[in-house]
Image (cartoon, rainbow, N blue to C red):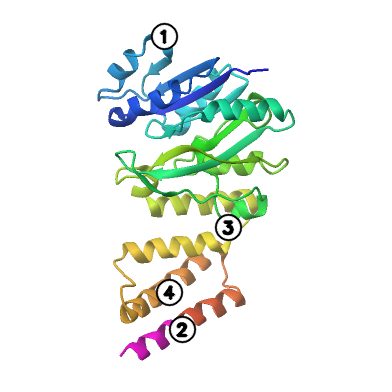
Amino acid sequence: MTKKISIVTPSYNQGIFLKRTIDSILDQKVQDLELIVFDGGSKDSSVEILNSYGDLLSYVSQKDEGQSDAVNKGLTHATGEIIGWLNSDDVYYPESLNKIIEVFNNNPDVDVIYGKADHIDENDNYLEDYYTEQWDYEKLKGICYICQPAVFFRRSVIEKYGILNKNLRYCMDYEYWLRIGQNKPFYFLDQKLAGSRLYSDNKTLGSRRAVHEEIIVMLKEKFGSAPEKWIYNLAHVITEEAGYSRENAIANYKFVKALVKKSAFLFMKYQKYIAFNQVRAMLSWLKSSRKAMLEAK
């Protein structure tokens, strides 16, 4: 039995991408589709674009408290049995929604489905595959292998687990997957469903340090500690932003020294100690990079 599907789209000053996003949803030719756009009071062409679709979608354009707040308003207003969330700079690939409906229809015990996705640029060109894995909750703590526009869930998920934490600016989706996935596995659909856009003004790409810092704090609050992988990732970001490169053996040695120093600082900041295995790992980085530097001279 075909189920009604609601797509929630938060938007703010994304007129350059908004039409492509909406068209990718409407072109799915889903029998019972609800498209809800919550726009944060855009000053560009967004409202004009939204108006051009008439009754094919519903929208509200007014000041909000950010992306999480806009998504939450959409989740609260959505009436579909299946819900998806597509940001106003991302796109669905053809037939994605019909496939999702089919999987839900054939698997009544499944509450959440996630599929594969691509990173695309401003002009919709393919950049790379979004890294995705089969469902493993423990692995999810160390790496977010779930691409947000390729996730769909039943209305019962919202009724049971609530909506997004609107205090989170960057990792609200990651926290939501961790929250709702703790008790029941997600269904992995081995098919590309969406394109997630990367560009210089994109929140994730343009605020890498802030993204990683928020993730670490979120994980500490949720689990009592953050996996060391996230701390090392933040150290890499900070080292790169400080101007260090790995273009040759000498530069790489300087990079590793700065990375070790920053990693040690971050372990003390977030963990209050440095474990023996972490000390051993960082010393091995220094040893191998120094050896490579000396051999290159």
Q: Indicate which disc, 2 or 4, sits on the residue closer to the N terminus.
A: 4
The verdict on residue 291 being magenta is yes
In the displayed structure, would residue 78 be above or below residue 287? above
Tag 1 secondary structure: helix
Question: Do labels 1 and 2 touch, CB within 8 Å?
Answer: no
Q: Residue flagged by tag 2: what amino acid is it?
A: Ser
Tag 3 secondary structure: loop
Residue 120, position as x, y percentages in the image? 37, 43
Q: Main secondary structure of the magenta part?
A: helix
Instruction: Compare residues 44 and 116 and report the one nearer the observer.
Output: 116
Mark 4 against mark 1, which lies toward the viewer?
1
Residue 186, position as x, y percentages in the image? 66, 40
Where residue 226 is drawn, which disc sits there?
A: 3
Q: Indicate which disc, 4 or 3, sits on the residue closer to the N terminus.
A: 3
Please indicate whether residue 188 sits to the left or right of residue 211 in the image.
right
Measure the alpha-carbon separation of dots 1 and 3: 46 Å
Residue positioned 56% across, 80% down in the render: 280
Where residue 261 is drawn, which disc sits there?
A: 4
Question: Do labels 4 and 3 touch, CB within 8 Å?
Answer: no
Q: Residues within 10 Å of mark 1 (few under 14, many from 20)?
A: few
Instruction: Compare residues 272 and 56 and report the one nearer the observer.
Output: 56
Q: State how many labels appear.
A: 4
